[in-house]
Image (cartoon, helix red, strand yellow):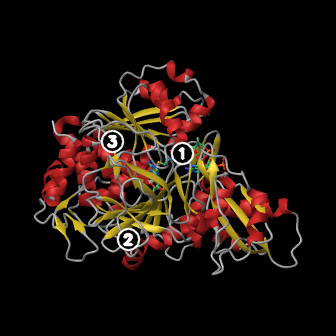
Amino acid sequence: MSTYKDEYAGWQSDPEAYWCEAAQAVDWFRAPQRILDDSKAPIYTWFADAEANTCYNAIDRHVENGRGDQAAIIYDSPVTDTKTSITYNALLDQVSRLAGVLASKGVTKGDRVVIYMPMVPDALVAMLACARIGAVHSVVFGGFAAHELAVRINDAAPKAVLSASCGIEGKRIIEYKPLLDEAIAQSENKPEFTVILQRPQVKASMVEGRDLDWADAISNADPVGCASVGGADPLYILYTSGTTGQPKGVVRHSGGHMVALLWSMKNLYNVQAGDVFWAASDVGWVVGHSYICYAPLLAGCTTMVFEGKPVGTPNPGTFWRIIEEHKVKVLFTAPTALRAIKREDPNAEYLKKYDLSGMDALFLAGERADPDTINWAQTHLQKPVVDHWWQTETGWAIAANPLGIEELPIKPGSPAVPMPGYQVEILDDAGHPVAPGTLGAIAIKLPLPPGTLPTLWNADDRFKKSYLEAFPGYYEIGDAGMVDEDGYVYIMARTDDVINVAGHRLSTGAMEEVLAAHPDVAECAVIGIGDKLKGQSPLGLICLNAGVDRAEADLQKECVSLVRHEIGPVAAFKQCLVVDALPKTRSGKILRGTMVSIADGTPWKMPATIDDPTTLDAIAERIGGLGEQTS
Ligand code: COA
Ligand code: AMP
């Protein structure tokens, strides 16, 4: 049995040999000869000369190997009172037919397809159908509004959009089609056609000549086979929040993605073909891409598609019911979901009603896991509760407790140790490594491992500027933290204007752009303040144009509705205050960090660089203690 230390040292001694060995888990059409291409460094590519198909590896090969009758997807939707199971055989049929629909309309290798769908199995079918023909999908989370969808459609310039008539949020039906129509109207790059899944809850109105009915199209389609795709051809683009309103299009190459995800299923999550794996997230996020859709299917597991919430659909026992009923071996969720359950069921009475003996471990990611939440879960589950840390850009864990190799001691508050492929360093402002236990910016020595982003879509320069320039030779993660004497990593805060609300990554810069467009707003700032349930929540501070004399309540209402309309309900923008002035440094930089400390009630000092101290005193009176600390 190898240990974590052996495994990590094995990778360090010969990274290319390590990933070449891991690549054996993929069925290639043409095996890789050159493992890492560094000829265009600092843009690196893995398995560039290989050929394979992700859909083939996720579906066809399992059917060929006798798994055709095994469930590939179990769909559990308490909001529609539906439970269904789709075998690998049935999934192959649906995916190859939808791929046939796309191909018959002229979608070919390299073309983009935007997917805007709720949590139904068809969302996975859509992703896999694109992968089958080598088209590049870009999934947009359903909680984003039309404008955000339009921004992504414009950037990706898709030939087609795949969507549904509606999503269901608790008891509410959210019509998707009007949002899609509005987004297409706003976009300069219009898709040639759409395919719309009509759900029984709402019938979407269709645009003649542009919109195809999903069920009709599929039933008339000829199934198509798998295209041969280059290892460094993009499988998908996933837009994520940066510091501005223009999201970053994270590119995922197909070859390294398969290698890394298969490695992680075995070594990190410790699951095998036939196991049931449940990532309680959404296909719109990276967790959904990697661990609802691709990794479980690549590994021949059964993946859960859950359409519901941790509480209220109908109660805080839903997660535990699903684990018992569908024999879930590993659950992966965000700490917010557990906090929501704990808040409604502090003594875990619901949990005690279910037989969770088949469950091996709970994995948490997406935001900081506070020790209280980890301890609560560990006490009641009596299973390893593993915090692990990653981001959209990396696609899989940077640091974790690799249960498939060795279960390391858990230190609540730390997502444990770096995975093979990641040399994690803590750097000071000048880019020098600091001593253990010292806070600094977290950076990863280049090259990043397979599966991580090679670049941003159509934006190599932005990629270099955003991630590679601050510390030459390193990838800058955007998180601050430290590493202790035992090599455990601790993540403390973001170093940019990105906030994390209920495990959802949001840009305060994007919200500021929306507020600044309000006719009465002269200046504004949005900060992320502590929130007991969601980790952080946004707080808007607006200064009004001279002469504007309006009630604060009216302005608040308008600003809240503006952000909801422009960015979407997922921004959870509910608090907005009118202030006389924003505190700034003498060079004009808004003191966001100090305001966050004030709101969260953590110690703060009057910055020496402040232009006018009275502005901060006035703000402190308004927002002091407004944020509820997580732990
Ligand atoms: N389509 C449309 N609207 C959506 C949506 C979707 N796919 N997802 C969320 N929304 C809406 C919600 O309805 C809510 O709207 P509201 O302001 O009208 O109430 C808003 O966006 C915020 O959503 P959410 O953050 O999910 O809050 P909530 O109050 O509905 O639920 C929790 C609270 C804690 C149950 C929920 O945040 C949760 O399950 N969090 C875990 C998050 C998670 O798994 N993240 C994955 C990252 S790995
Ligand atoms: P996303 O790209 O949406 O997955 O968000 C990634 C960001 O979420 C990271 O850069 C971190 O700031 C935060 N994050 C993710 N996982 C963790 C974790 N386990 N602990 C602390 N922060 C985390």
Q: SS class of the residue under badge 2?
A: loop
Residue 382 is situated, as x and y percent measured from the top left of the image, at 41, 25
Mark sitting on residue 431:
2
Residue denoted by label 3: 401
Please name the residue shown 23% across and 53% down the image.
259
**What type is the residue that disc 3 sits on?**
Asn
Q: Earlier in the sequence, mark 3 or mark 2?
A: 3
Query: Quarter of the image containing the N terminus?
Result: top left
Regarding mark 3 in the picture, which secondary structure is present there? loop
Q: Which amino acid does label 1 sit on?
A: Arg
Q: Disc 1 marks which residue?
A: 199
Tell me which residue sits at (79%, 58%) in the image. Answer: 621
Q: Is residue 478 left or right of residue 103?
A: right
What secondary structure is marked by label 1?
Answer: loop
Lower sequence index among marks 1 and 2: 1
First reached walking from the N terminus: tag 1 or tag 3: 1
Residue 558, visible in the rendered structure:
no
In this picture, residue 440 sits left or right of residue 208: left
Between marks 3 and 2 in the image, the one whose residue lies nearer the viewer: 2
